[in-house]
Image (cartoon, rainbow, N blue to C red):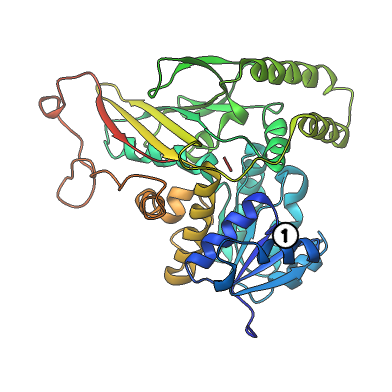
């Protein structure tokens, strides 16, 4: 392949990077597999399940803005899979902007998402470029559930629970250790409001009789997606953790972080959370769709309406691969739907993302749209049109970075 591909996947040799690579190959999209270690990249590409069909160029590159910009030069889309993003992301975002590439990533780190929104969003928008972080199971799957609920325009408040059924990768573990020790936000009366330190809640999951302890997990990106959305007044996100000892350990880490946060430098704090993550991290086996099952529950309401959306699905990391590959395909074929900082649903539409998961065997076919006003927009329902039950329940399947 002589022509340089229009897509670069930076971090292609990692666990999630390989899943993204396979999904791009499935779609027939050529790409550059980039990273810091050429031998590791070549080994990763050679061992992809569909390697024989791959149209891939391998590029070893230093983690440096100028070096990355040279690799991104001539491409249209840069996919960043290298975390923790709060520690390593700036060089990649700067390089993507320098090369005038659309930027997608798989972060779960909400402080990084806020930084991208505030510092990079306006610049990308001026150049007509998309800046879409967290195009991943966390935090796109919960937004899909939220958008399905918001198809009923009487809904304005969202309570979203993730119950991942997969063990986190090493990179995800380092990321979530950053997330649970930083300020975590929920949306309360249209304003971001910090969760209390050490917050944990009990959630009754829709697929089980079990009541599970749940953590804000960085607060989720959904409150950030909806911070200035006139449709949404309240939004909170929690993640159910079925290992109670892990919940205790994470809360203890958060308390220890609070104690030392005023006496240590930012680099020392980053090293501390990395050390905690490395102490418990390991590389999980590839997901099994019959064993690694996930649930997203969105309980939504308005002043006089309520709706439940439950997404039953499989293999969250595989879903991330599908989300990224779908985003890349739509950018290459249809161009940008949103410029500058945008959530996954704003950038690509929640129903196309559901359809892509369904096509990959990770989700049921998309549910029917809400009532329409005749012009394609979901209608507000009068009281006489609402179901007699307190909540209209939508059950369908769906869905970690």
Which is more toward the observer, 155 or 81? 81
Q: Residues within 10 Å of mark 1 (few under 14, many from 20)?
A: some
Q: Return the residue found at the far left.
A: 384
Which is more toward the observer, 44 or 218? 44
Q: Which residue is mark 1?
A: 94
Residue 109: give x, y in percent of width and height.
Answer: 65, 39
* Left or right placement of residue 43 versus residue 337 in this view: right
Residue drawn at (72%, 33%), measured in percent from left and top? 178
Residue 282: give x, y in percent of width and height.
Answer: 73, 37
The vertical placement of 183 against 97, above or below, is: above
Residue 165: give x, y in percent of width and height.
Answer: 52, 33
* Left or right placement of residue 212 versus residue 206 in this view: right
Residue drawn at (49%, 30%), measured in percent from left and top? 162
The vertical placement of 301 against 198, above or below, is: below
The vertical placement of 157 against 197, above or below, is: below
Residue drawn at (80%, 30%), measured in percent from left and top? 279
Which is more toward the observer, 175 or 158? 175
* Left or right placement of residue 261 versus residue 153 in this view: right
């Amino acid at each position: 392949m002589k022509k340089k591909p229009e897509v670069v996947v930076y971090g292609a040799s990692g666990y999630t990077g390989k899943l993204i690579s396979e999904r791009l190959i499935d779609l027939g999209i050529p790409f550059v597999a980039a990273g810091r270690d050429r031998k590791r990249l070549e080994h990763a590409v050679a061992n992809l399940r569909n390697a024989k069909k791959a149209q891939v160029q391998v590029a070893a590159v230093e983690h440096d803005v100028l070096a990355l910009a040279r690799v991104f030069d001539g491409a249209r889309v840069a996919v960043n899979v290298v975390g923790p993003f709060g520690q390593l992301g700036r060089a990649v975002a700067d390089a993507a902007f320098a090369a005038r590439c659309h930027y997608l990533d798989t972060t779960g780190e909400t402080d990084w998402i806020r930084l991208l929104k505030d510092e990079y969003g306006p610049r990308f928008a001026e150049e007509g470029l998309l800046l879409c972080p967290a195009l991943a199971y966390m935090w796109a799957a919960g937004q899909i559930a939220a958008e399905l609920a918001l198809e009923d325009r009487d809904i304005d408040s969202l309570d979203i629970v993730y119950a991942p059924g997969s063990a986190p990768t090493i990179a995800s573990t380092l990321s979530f250790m950053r997330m649970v020790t930083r300020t975590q936000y929920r949306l309360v009366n249209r304003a971001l409001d910090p969760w209390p330190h050490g917050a944990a809640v009990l959630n009754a999951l829709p697929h089980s009789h079990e009541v599970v302890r749940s953590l804000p997990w960085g607060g989720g990106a959904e409150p950030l997606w909806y911070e200035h959305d006139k449709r949404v007044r309240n939004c909170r996100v929690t993640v159910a953790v079925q290992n109670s000892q892990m919940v205790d350990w994470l809360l203890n880490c958060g308390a220890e972080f609070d104690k030392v946060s005023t006496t240590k430098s930012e680099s020392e704090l980053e090293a501390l959370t990395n050390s905690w993550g490395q102490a418990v991290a390991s590389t999980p086996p590839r997901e099994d769709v019959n064993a690694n099952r996930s649930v997203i529950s969105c309980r939504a309401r308005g002043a006089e309406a309520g709706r439940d959306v439950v997404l039953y699905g499989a293999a969250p990391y595989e879903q991330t691969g599908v989300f990224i590959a779908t985003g890349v395909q739509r950018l290459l074929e249809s161009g940008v739907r949103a410029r500058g900082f945008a959530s996954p649903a704003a950038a690509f539409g929640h129903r196309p993302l559901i359809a892509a998961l369904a096509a990959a065997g990770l989700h049921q076919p998309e549910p029917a749209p809400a009532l329409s006003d005749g012009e394609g927009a979901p209608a507000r329902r009068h009281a006489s049109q609402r179901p007699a039950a307190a909540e209209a329940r939508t059950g369908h399947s769906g869905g970690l970075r």
